[in-house]
Image (cartoon, grey):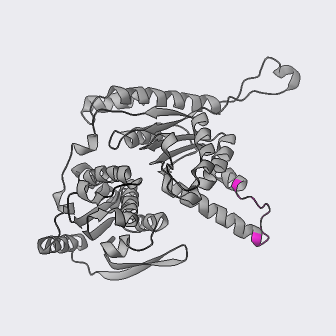
C-alpha cells in the first residue's frame, strides 16, 4: 500500500503527507499478518508427539479516527482494494448494523416457526457474518442508536472469537463513541473489546483535502426563492432528459415509501417529504440503491428544535456519499450555516456533512458518480 500511495503522490493525484505514509506502513503490516495467518500452520516443537499444529492468532485490526476530510476513507478504501484477503467486505457501518438486525429478526422468526433452535440469536448471526468475511472494513463508525449499542459488545465478542479482523474509520476516538447515549454504561464493554482487538490510529493530517476542490455550483443552489426554484426546475428537466416523470413508491421492511417525482433513475423530494417524516437508515439505503440522483428542494436552516431533521439530513448525506450517488439541492444558506444547534452530537457530526457536501460538488466526485451510473445502466 505504501508503494501505491507513493505512486499517487508522484502522479500528482494526492499531496504527500507523512502521517498518511505512517498509516500506509501500518496497513501494510496488517496485510502481511493476514497472509501469515492464512498460511498452513507449522508444527510446534512437540507437534510430533501430540499431533497438533499451532495457528497464529488473528492480527489486531485498526481503528482510524480524525477530523473530517483528512483522508481516512481514502486510506481504508485503498487498503481494501489492494488486500489479497479473499473473504473481505467494505460497507458503511449503518448498513452493517441494518444487516445485523435483519439477521437477528430472521433467526427469532425461524425459532418461533420451529425451523431453528436457540433463544440467543447472537452466536448464529456472528457465525454467519464471520463465514462471509474474515476482514470487515467499516466507514464512518458511529453509534447513535440504543438498539445498536445494546448488541455491539456481544456481537463483536463473537466475531473476534472467530478471528474476524476489523478496520474502521470514524470521526471520534473509541472512548467518545455513543457519548451521552441512553444507558451508555451498558455500551462501555464494547469500547474495551474494540480497543483490545484493534490498534487506534489518530490521523491528524494537516489539510482537509476535500475542501480544496469546490466546483459543481449547479448542484447546490442558494439562497431559496423564485430564482432558486426556477434553477431547480431547469436542473430537474436536465436530469430527466426529456423523459416523463411519475410518482413511484417502494417497500422497505413492510412499509411503502412514496416518491412524489421520479424519472430516468432520479428522484425529487421536498424537504418535508424526506426529512420531516420518520425515515431512517434502511429507508435511505433503499433510496440510494434505487436512484442514482436525488433532487432535494428547500433545505432550511435547522435549529436545535429541528434536531431530528438534522439527524436525518446527516444520515441521508452519509448514505448518498457512501453509495457514490449525486445530490442536487436548494438550501436557505451555504452548507456550513445550515445547522445552528446548541448541543448534541449533531454539532460535530454536521461538520462531516458540510465536508461531504463540498466534495459531492467537486468535478471528481460528479465524474465518479456519473461513471457508476453508466456502468449500472
The quarter of the rendered structure image containing the C terminus is: bottom left
Horizontally, is 262 left or right of 116 in the view? left
Horizontally, is 351 left or right of 64 in the view? left
Q: Give the percent coordinates (x, y) of residue 194.
A: 58, 40
Q: Residue furthest top?
A: 45
Q: Give the percent coordinates (x, y) of residue 321.
A: 36, 55
Q: Residue furthest left?
A: 227
**Is residue 114 in the magenta section?**
yes
Q: Quadrant of residue 292?
A: bottom left
**Bounds of the magenta span?**
112-122
4 over 186 or under it: above or below: above
Q: Give the percent coordinates (x, y) of residue 362.
A: 23, 51
Horizontally, is 292 left or right of 190 in the view? left
The quarter of the rendered structure image containing the N terminus is: top left
Between residue 367 and residue 359, name the one nearer to us: 359
72 over 251 or under it: above or below: above
Q: Residue at x 17, y 61 (%)?
A: 218
Between residue 315 and residue 376, name the one nearer to us: 315
Q: Residue at x 50, y 33 (%)?
A: 200
Q: Say whether residue 232 is visible.
A: yes
369 over 20 or under it: above or below: below
**Is residue 244 in the magenta section?**
no
Between residue 322 and residue 296, name the one nearer to us: 296
Q: Residue at x 62, y 55 (%)?
A: 150
Q: Give the percent coordinates (x, y) of residue 234.
A: 16, 72
Q: Residue at x 37, y 70 (%)?
A: 275
Q: How many marks?
A: 0
Q: Quadrant of residue 268?
A: bottom left
Q: Main secondary structure of the magenta part?
A: loop
Q: Say whether residue 377 is visible.
A: no
Between residue 183 and residue 149, name the one nearer to us: 183
Q: Quadrant of residue 17?
A: top left
Amino acid at each position: 500500500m505504501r508503494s501505491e500511495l507513493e505512486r499517487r503522490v508522484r502522479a500528482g493525484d494526492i499531496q504527500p503527507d507523512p502521517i498518511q505514509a505512517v498509516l500506509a506502513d501500518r496497513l501494510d503490516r496488517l496485510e502481511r499478518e493476514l497472509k501469515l495467518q492464512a498460511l498452513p500452520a507449522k508444527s510446534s516443537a512437540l507437534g510430533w508427539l501430540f499431533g497438533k499444529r499451532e495457528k497464529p492468532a488473528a492480527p489486531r485490526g485498526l481503528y482510524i479516527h480524525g477530523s473530517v476530510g483528512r483522508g481516512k476513507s481514502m486510506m481504508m478504501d485503498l487498503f481494501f482494494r489492494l488486500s489479497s484477503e479473499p473473504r473481505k467486505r467494505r460497507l458503511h457501518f449503518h448498513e452493517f448494523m441494518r444487516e445485523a438486525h435483519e439477521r437477528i429478526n430472521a433467526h427469532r422468526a425461524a425459532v418461533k416457526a420451529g425451523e431453528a433452535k436457540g433463544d440467543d440469536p447472537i452466536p448464529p448471526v456472528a457465525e454467519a457474518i464471520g463465514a462471509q468475511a474474515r476482514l470487515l472494513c467499516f466507514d464512518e463508525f458511529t453509534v447513535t442508536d440504543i438498539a445498536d449499542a445494546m448488541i455491539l459488545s456481544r456481537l463483536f465478542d463473537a466475531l473476534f472469537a472467530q478471528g474476524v479482523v476489523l478496520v474502521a474509520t470514524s470521526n471520534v476516538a473509541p472512548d467518545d463513541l455513543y457519548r451521552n447515549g441512553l444507558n451508555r454504561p451498558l455500551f462501555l464493554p464494547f469500547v474495551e473489546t474494540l480497543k483490545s482487538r484493534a490498534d487506534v490510529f489518530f490521523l491528524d493530517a494537516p489539510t482537509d483535502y476535500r475542501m480544496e476542490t469546490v466546483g459543481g455550483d449547479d448542484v447546490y443552489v442558494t439562497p431559496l426563492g423564485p430564482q432558486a426554484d426556477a434553477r431547480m426546475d431547469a436542473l430537474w428537466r436536465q436530469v430527466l432528459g426529456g423523459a416523463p416523470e411519475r410518482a413511484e413508491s417502494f417497500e422497505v421492511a413492510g412499509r411503502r415509501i412514496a416518491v412524489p417525482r421520479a424519472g430516468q433513475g432520479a428522484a425529487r423530494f421536498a424537504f418535508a417529504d424526506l426529512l420531516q417524516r420518520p425515515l431512517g437508515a434502511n429507508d435511505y439505503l433503499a433510496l440510494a440503491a434505487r436512484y442514482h440522483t436525488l433532487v432535494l428542494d428547500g433545505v432550511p436552516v435547522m435549529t436545535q428544535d429541528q434536531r431530528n431533521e438534522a439527524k436525518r439530513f446527516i444520515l441521508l448525506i452519509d448514505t448518498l456519499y457512501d453509495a457514490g450517488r449525486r445530490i442536487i439541492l436548494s438550501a436557505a444558506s451555504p452548507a456550513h450555516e445550515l445547522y445552528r444547534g446548541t448541543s448534541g452530537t449533531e454539532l460535530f457530526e454536521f461538520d462531516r456533512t458540510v465536508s461531504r457536501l463540498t466534495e459531492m460538488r467537486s468535478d471528481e466526485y460528479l465524474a465518479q458518480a456519473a461513471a457508476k451510473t453508466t456502468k449500472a445502466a
